[in-house]
Image: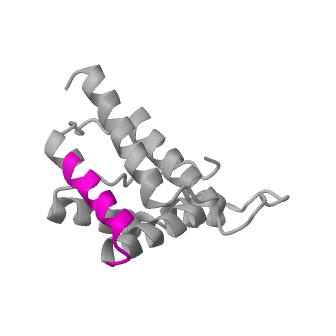
């Protein structure tokens, strides 16, 4: 895909994602950050597939219009992503974490991200399942 097509895909995903979360304050920022991270640092084997993007946009459209399974999946993804970003706390801890806490923080969401990848594979979508290995990110 050309750069213009990638930008168009990003804008369509972002626009439909904002509509799906109904522009609610914490959810729109979490969605934006996750989508940005997925487009800024794509994995080496990632190739933008227009069909996957269209399937994801369709998923987001259903999440917008229906209060069904798609809406609940998106809502739970955003809650988990927000907890992953902020660690369930509003502020960063004042003391330095131990090496064991760092290891737990970096590997806690591996199974969750694997489940997102399996959802993407089974439904031919491209929901960002970015594993962040830096505990301070």
Q: Which residue appears at 63% of the width and 66% of the height?
A: 100
Give residue 97's quadrant in the image.
Answer: bottom right
**Looking at the image, which residue sits at the far front?**
65
Q: Can residue 68 be seen in the rendering of this structure?
A: yes
Q: Which residue lies furthest to the right in this view?
A: 94
* Range shown magenta: 54-68
x and y percent of residue 29 in the render?
58, 50
Give the image's coloring scheme.
one colour
User: Residue 21's x, y, as percent?
Assistant: 48, 61
Residue 70 covered by magenta stretch: no
Give the overall secondary structure of the magenta segment.
helix
Let me know if residue 64 is in the magenta part: yes
Is residue 87 shown left or right of residue 39? right
In the depicted view, which residue is nearer to us: 13 or 86? 13
**How many numbered circles are shown?**
0
Q: Can residue 131 be seen in this view?
A: no
In this rendering, the answer to whether 103 lies above or below 126 is below
Q: Which image quadrant for residue 8?
A: top left
Residue closer to the observer: 106 or 33: 33
Q: In this view, does 66 lie to the left or right of 122?
A: right
Q: Give the residue displayed 56% in from the left and 48% down from the top.
A: 134
Reply above or below: 7 against 100.
above
Which sits in the foreground, 128 or 100? 128
Q: Residue lying furthest top in this view?
A: 3
Question: Residue at the bottom extreme?
Answer: 68
Indicate the position of residue 112 as horizontal and vertical percent values. 40, 69
Relative placement, left or right, of 119 versus 40 is left
């Amino acid at each position: 895909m050309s750069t213009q097509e990638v930008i168009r895909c990003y804008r369509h995903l972002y626009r439909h994602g904002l509509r799906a979360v109904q522009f609610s304050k914490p959810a729109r920022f979490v969605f934006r950050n996750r989508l940005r991270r997925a487009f800024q640092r794509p994995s080496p084997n990632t190739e933008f597939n227009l069909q996957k993007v269209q399937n994801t946009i369709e998923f987001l459209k259903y999440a917008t219009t229906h209060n069904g399974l798609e809406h609940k999946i998106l809502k739970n993804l955003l809650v988990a992503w927000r907890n992953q970003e902020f660690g369930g706390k509003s502020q960063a801890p004042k003391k330095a974490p131990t090496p064991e806490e760092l290891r737990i923080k970096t590997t806690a969401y591996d199974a969750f991200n694997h489940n997102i990848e399996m959802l993407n594979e089974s439904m031919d979508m491209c929901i960002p399942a970015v594993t962040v290995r830096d505990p301070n990110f």
